[in-house]
Image (cartoon, helix red, strand yellow):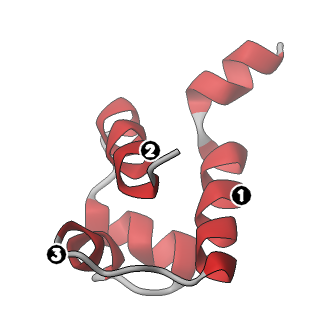
Amino acid sequence: MHLLSTIERYLRRTGLPPTRFGREAVGDPRFVMDLRRGREPRPCTIDRVVAYIAAHDPAAQDAAR
Protein backbone atom coordinates (compact mmCIF):
# COMPACT_ATOMS: atom_id res chain seq x y z
CA MET A 1 0.00 0.00 0.00
CA HIS A 2 1.33 3.40 -0.93
CA LEU A 3 0.22 5.91 1.67
CA LEU A 4 -0.04 8.93 -0.62
CA SER A 5 -2.17 7.14 -3.20
CA THR A 6 -4.46 5.89 -0.41
CA ILE A 7 -4.83 9.44 0.90
CA GLU A 8 -5.44 10.85 -2.59
CA ARG A 9 -8.23 8.30 -3.23
CA TYR A 10 -9.78 9.14 0.14
CA LEU A 11 -9.65 12.88 -0.62
CA ARG A 12 -11.31 12.36 -4.03
CA ARG A 13 -14.08 10.21 -2.54
CA THR A 14 -14.85 12.55 0.34
CA GLY A 15 -14.06 15.96 -1.14
CA LEU A 16 -12.07 16.78 2.00
CA PRO A 17 -9.38 19.43 1.42
CA PRO A 18 -5.80 18.16 1.93
CA THR A 19 -5.09 20.72 4.64
CA ARG A 20 -8.11 19.70 6.68
CA PHE A 21 -7.23 16.02 6.27
CA GLY A 22 -3.70 16.62 7.54
CA ARG A 23 -4.93 18.69 10.46
CA GLU A 24 -7.53 16.12 11.51
CA ALA A 25 -5.47 12.99 10.88
CA VAL A 26 -2.06 13.98 12.24
CA GLY A 27 -2.30 17.57 13.45
CA ASP A 28 -0.32 18.97 10.49
CA PRO A 29 -2.17 20.93 7.79
CA ARG A 30 0.84 20.65 5.46
CA PHE A 31 1.09 16.87 5.78
CA VAL A 32 -0.38 15.97 2.36
CA MET A 33 1.54 18.71 0.57
CA ASP A 34 4.76 17.50 2.19
CA LEU A 35 4.02 13.91 1.14
CA ARG A 36 3.48 15.11 -2.42
CA ARG A 37 6.94 16.69 -2.23
CA GLY A 38 8.59 13.48 -1.03
CA ARG A 39 8.24 13.53 2.76
CA GLU A 40 8.67 10.08 4.31
CA PRO A 41 6.41 9.71 7.37
CA ARG A 42 7.39 7.66 10.40
CA PRO A 43 5.65 4.31 10.96
CA CYS A 44 3.59 5.69 13.85
CA THR A 45 2.35 8.51 11.58
CA ILE A 46 1.39 6.01 8.91
CA ASP A 47 -0.57 4.07 11.53
CA ARG A 48 -2.43 7.24 12.56
CA VAL A 49 -3.35 8.04 8.96
CA VAL A 50 -4.56 4.51 8.24
CA ALA A 51 -6.64 4.51 11.43
CA TYR A 52 -8.14 7.90 10.58
CA ILE A 53 -9.17 6.78 7.09
CA ALA A 54 -10.61 3.52 8.42
CA ALA A 55 -12.71 5.44 10.95
CA HIS A 56 -13.92 8.15 8.54
CA ASP A 57 -14.12 6.53 5.10
CA PRO A 58 -17.74 6.29 3.92
CA ALA A 59 -16.84 3.52 1.47
CA ALA A 60 -15.34 1.37 4.23
CA GLN A 61 -18.33 2.02 6.48
CA ASP A 62 -20.77 1.04 3.71
CA ALA A 63 -18.87 -2.18 3.09
CA ALA A 64 -19.14 -3.10 6.79
CA ARG A 65 -22.95 -2.89 6.74
Q: Where is residue 40 in the image (x, y as percent from the top left)?
A: 39, 79
Say whether residue 61 is left or right of residue 4.
right
Say whether residue 8 is left or right of residue 53.
left
* Type of amino acid at the residue the image marks with label 3: Arg
Q: Residue at x 44, y 78 (%)?
A: 23
Q: Which residue is drawn at 28% across and 82% down?
A: 30
The vertical placement of 33 against 11, above or below, is below
Say whether residue 37 is left or right of residue 28.
left
Q: Which mark is residue 43?
A: none
Tell me the SS state at disc 3. Answer: loop
Q: Which residue is drawn at 29% across and 72% down?
A: 35
Q: Using a 10 Å C-alpha cutoff, classify the residue at mark 2 as few (fewer than 14 neighbours), some (14 to 19) or many (20 or more).
A: few
Say whether residue 16 is left or right of residue 10.
left
* Type of amino acid at the residue the image marks with label 1: Ala
Q: Which residue is drawn at 71% across and 58% down?
A: 51
Q: Name the residue under label 2.
A: 6
User: For residue 60, what is the image quadrant?
Assistant: top right
Q: Where is residue 26 in the image (x, y as percent from the top left)?
A: 54, 79
Mark 2 → mark 1, Cα distance in angstroms: 12 Å
* Type of amino acid at the residue the image marks with label 2: Thr
Instruction: Check whether the beta carbons of the residues at disc 3 and disc 1 lie within 8 A of each other.
Output: no
User: For residue 64, what is the image quadrant?
Assistant: top right
Q: Earlier in the sequence, mark 2 or mark 3?
A: 2
Tell me the SS state at disc 2. Answer: helix
Q: Where is residue 25 in the image (x, y as percent from the top left)?
A: 55, 70
Q: Where is residue 2 in the image (x, y as percent from the top left)?
A: 44, 50
Q: Nearer the viewer, mark 3 or mark 1?
A: 3
Mark 2 → mark 3, Cα distance in angstroms: 16 Å
Q: Residue 37 carries which label?
A: 3
Q: Using a 10 Å C-alpha cutoff, classify the residue at mark 1 as few (fewer than 14 neighbours), some (14 to 19) or many (20 or more).
A: few
Q: Name the residue under label 1.
A: 51
